[in-house]
């Protein structure tokens, strides 16, 4: 019996920071009216609070393709930005605010977040970070697990393309994605375990629930996981991107990788599953250097520029990009490599500003302004 082709539908979740347009600091207590008005104006989409009151999260409707996802993200970013602006706030699609301090920020008064705050203590109080998650429709649960085992290999490449968090509390962290370091302080994060079947995965979740470690599968905060709500495989590792076209490229490339792996399986082939330690090493390199790093090619084995490996993935998934109608978005990954990610642009502006005489605070304010502008650039 042949395996039915997955739908490869797309859902994108992005977390944003709300910034006071006068001080450029995070908004400590934004008006509740922002959330309620956005929810009213965006039926079919999701707009929800995040852990910190200075954040909010959006989720697109189920999108048939990348073109549909583009329209959804434009509508979401445009509407949320417009509403926030009327309250004196700006929308910032960056994984970390360059100079804000987590101390003094308040978490959203909601039962789920109250429990997380109680259980995680200081590790979660530092969660002044935002990410981008991509859901891809893989309806067959056994296929979902099989593709998760193989797709973990490609996660560092996607992270490298997304990096937008080089600063932390007013300092250059030396990492292109400091967000990942903050998030890794929580339990049940990182590269997912390997499972022989969906049943084995379900048994792990059941064991953790029965032991009182978690309430449900949504508390498995892996970089890649079977969604506990939808028939999707959810990629969670990437930073949120200020430029919406970069977000769409990451979503498109992720979908193409999954379709390529499905296509291999259909032809009785598969991608080699490498040890978690090796994949985690590439994850660290991507976190540290972004697209400027040399990731490890495990087949050689040896270091290869991330740019070359990303170009190789584009070639491997060319047939799948054509099938899914996202060739232009996948090719845009080469443009990201050429001109750098948001982290690269933030660092370049900071160096230029300080070289021109700005002090640290003034230079970082310029970085904030750049990200605020990019977040809504090109939004129709």
Image: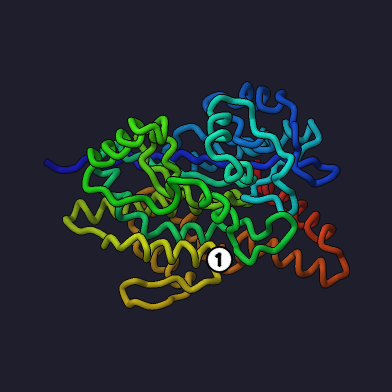
Can residue 375 be seen here? yes
Question: Residue visible at 16% across and 56% down?
Answer: 268
Query: Which quadrant would residue 105 be assigned to in this image?
Result: top right
Work out which residue is located at the far left of the displayed protein and give it: 1
Q: Quadrant of the C terminus?
A: top right
Residue at the spot of label 1: 288
Q: In which quarter of the image is the N terminus?
A: top left
Work out which residue is located at the far right of the displayed protein and give it: 357
Residue 131 located left or right of residue 107: left
Residue 366 or 364: which is nearer the viewer? 364
What kind of element bears circle 1? helix
Q: Position of residue 11 (x, y in %)?
A: 46, 38
Question: Residue visible at 82% across and 68% down?
Answer: 354
Answer few, some or many: residues within 10 Å of disc 1's Cα (few below 14, many 20 plus, some between 14 and 19).
Answer: many
Question: Residue visible at 54% across and 43% down?
Answer: 70
Q: Where is residue 130 in the image (x, y as percent from the top left)?
A: 60, 45
Query: Which quadrant would residue 162 be assigned to in this image?
Result: bottom right
Question: Residue visible at 24% across and 41% down?
Answer: 200
Residue 143 located left or right of residue 176: left
Can residue 245 be seen here? no
Q: Position of residue 78 (x, y in %)?
A: 66, 37
Q: Position of residue 156 (x, y in %)?
A: 45, 60
Residue 345 or 290: which is nearer the viewer? 290
Query: Which quadrant would residue 367 be assigned to in this image?
Result: bottom right
């Amino acid at each position: 019996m042949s395996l039915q082709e997955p739908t490869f539908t797309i859902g994108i979740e992005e977390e944003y920071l709300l910034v006071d347009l006068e001080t450029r600091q995070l908004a400590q207590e934004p008006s509740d009216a922002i959330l309620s008005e956005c929810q009213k104006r965006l039926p079919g989409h999701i707009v929800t609070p995040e852990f910190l009151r200075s954040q909010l999260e959006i989720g697109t409707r189920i999108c048939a393709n990348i073109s549909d996802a583009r329209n959804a993200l434009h509508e979401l970013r445009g509407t949320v930005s417009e509403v926030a602006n009327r309250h004196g706030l700006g929308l910032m699609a960056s994984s970390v605010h360059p100079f804000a301090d987590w101390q003094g920020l308040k978490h959203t008064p909601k039962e789920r977040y109250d429990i997380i705050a109680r259980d995680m203590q200081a590790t979660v109080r530092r969660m002044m970070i935002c990410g981008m998650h991509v859901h891809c429709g893989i309806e067959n649960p056994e296929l979902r697990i099989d593709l998760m085992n193989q797709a973990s290999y490609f996660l560092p490449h996607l992270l490298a393309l997304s990096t937008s968090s080089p600063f932390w509390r007013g300092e250059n962290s030396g990492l292109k994605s400091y967000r990942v370091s903050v998030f890794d302080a929580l339990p049940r994060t990182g590269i997912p375990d390997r499972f022989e079947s969906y049943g084995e995965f379900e048994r792990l979740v059941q064991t953790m629930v029965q032991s009182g470690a978690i309430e449900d599968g949504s508390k498995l905060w892996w970089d890649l996981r079977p969604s506990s709500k939808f028939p999707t495989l959810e990629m969670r590792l990437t930073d949120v991107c200020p430029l919406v076209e970069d977000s769409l490229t990451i979503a498109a490339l992720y979908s193409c990788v999954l379709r390529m792996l499905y296509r291999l399986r259909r032809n009785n082939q598969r991608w080699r599953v490498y040890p978690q330690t090796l994949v985690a090493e590439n994850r660290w390199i991507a976190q540290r250097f972004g697209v400027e790093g040399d990731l490890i090619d495990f087949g050689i084995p040896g270091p290869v520029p991330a740019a070359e490996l990303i170009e190789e993935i584009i070639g491997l998934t060319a047939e799948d990009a054509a099938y899914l109608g996202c060739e232009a978005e996948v090719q845009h990954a080469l443009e990201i490599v050429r001109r750098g990610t948001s982290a690269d642009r933030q660092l370049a502006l900071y160096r230029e500003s300080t070289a021109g005489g700005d002090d640290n605070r003034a230079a970082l304010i310029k970085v904030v302004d750049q990200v605020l502008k990019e977040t809504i650039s090109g939004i129709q």
